[in-house]
Image (cartoon, rainbow, N blue to C red):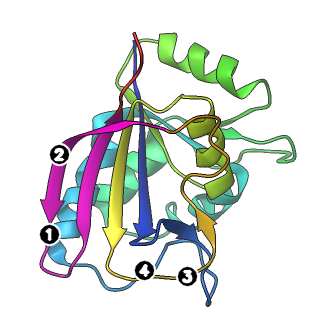
């Protein structure tokens, strides 16, 4: 069964979007080359990308036309599923819209053969995944900035989400990557 991996940039205070200046990538700035190298590996490790409408629209406007080929090619050529009730058409190559129940759609994707599934934003979409216990691994790219306001990664969890640290990397620019797995009751 395929796993759902969530990779998300956030500030040290847990904000993934917003803050005083708005924006969608918490505290984005010029990244250390080692951070970029780590991030470029991710799209090659998965067989499907999933995201909400807002992130889909941002990525669809960017990746077909920009970015280093080593990151853009797998983003453009790997199947993508956008979860939306309002998006009328998915025009980005290898994209389709999922309009059904989130939990059922994820179960269907997990049961398909192939590599793992990479979840991207937006914040509302990843909050819904977390609330339903649908994320198997959190790959958090923590940027050295506090935003003070905005959309948090976790919101309205029905119970505390216990996590186990499975990997950790620190970079020269102050970025920290923490990879966690939920501790599921057996």
Kindly identify the residue that appears in the image at 14 percent across and 72 percent down: 171
Camera-near label (1 vs 3) is: 3
Task: State the CA–CA distance, disc 4 to disc 3.
Answer: 15 Å
Up the image or down, 75 lies above or below 174; here it is above
Q: Disc 4 designates what residue?
A: 28
Up the image or down, 179 lies above or below 36; here it is above
- Please say whether residue 171 is one of the residues in the magenta stretch: yes
Camera-near label (4 vs 2) is: 2
Circle nearer the N terminus (1, 4): 4
Give the left or right position of residue 50, taking residue 99 as reference. left
Kindly identify the residue that appears in the image at 40 percent across and 19 percent down: 2
Task: State the CA–CA distance, disc 1 to disc 2.
Answer: 16 Å
The segment highlighted magenta reads 161-181
Q: Disc 3 designates what residue?
A: 148
Circle nearer the N terminus (4, 2): 4
Q: Disc 1 designates what residue?
A: 34
User: Which image quadrant: the C terminus?
Assistant: top left
- For disc 1, the neighbor class at 10 Å (few under 14, some 14 to 19, many from 20) is some
- Please say whether residue 87 is one of the residues in the magenta stretch: no
User: Residue 67, position in %: x, y?
Assistant: 39, 69
Q: Disc 2 designates what residue?
A: 167
- For disc 3, the neighbor class at 10 Å (few under 14, some 14 to 19, many from 20) is some
Circle nearer the N terminus (1, 2): 1
Camera-near label (1 vs 2) is: 2
Task: State the CA–CA distance, disc 4 to disc 2.
Answer: 22 Å
User: Residue 154, position in %: x, y?
Assistant: 56, 52
Residue 89: which disc?
Answer: none
Circle nearer the N terminus (1, 3): 1
């Amino acid at each position: 069964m395929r796993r759902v991996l969530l990779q998300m940039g956030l500030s040290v205070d847990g904000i993934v979007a917003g803050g005083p200046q708005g924006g969608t990538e918490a505290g984005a700035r010029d990244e250390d080359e080692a951070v970029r190298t780590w991030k470029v590996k991710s799209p090659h490790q998965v067989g499907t990308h999933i995201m909400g409408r807002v992130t889909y629209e941002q990525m669809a406007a960017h990746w077909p036309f920009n970015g280093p080929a080593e990151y853009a090619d797998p983003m453009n050529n790997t199947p993508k599923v956008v979860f939306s009730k309002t998006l009328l058409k998915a025009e980005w190559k290898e994209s389709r819209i999922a309009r059904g129940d989130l939990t059922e759609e994820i179960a269907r994707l997990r049961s398909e053969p192939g590599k793992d599934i990479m979840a991207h934003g937006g914040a509302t979409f990843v909050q819904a995944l977390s609330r339903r216990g649908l994320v198997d691994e959190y790959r958090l790219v923590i940027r050295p900035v506090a935003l003070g306001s905005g959309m948090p990664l976790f919101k309205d969890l029905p119970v505390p989400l216990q996590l186990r640290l499975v990997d950790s990397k620190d970079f020269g620019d102050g970025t920290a990557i923490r990879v966690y797995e939920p501790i599921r009751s057996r």
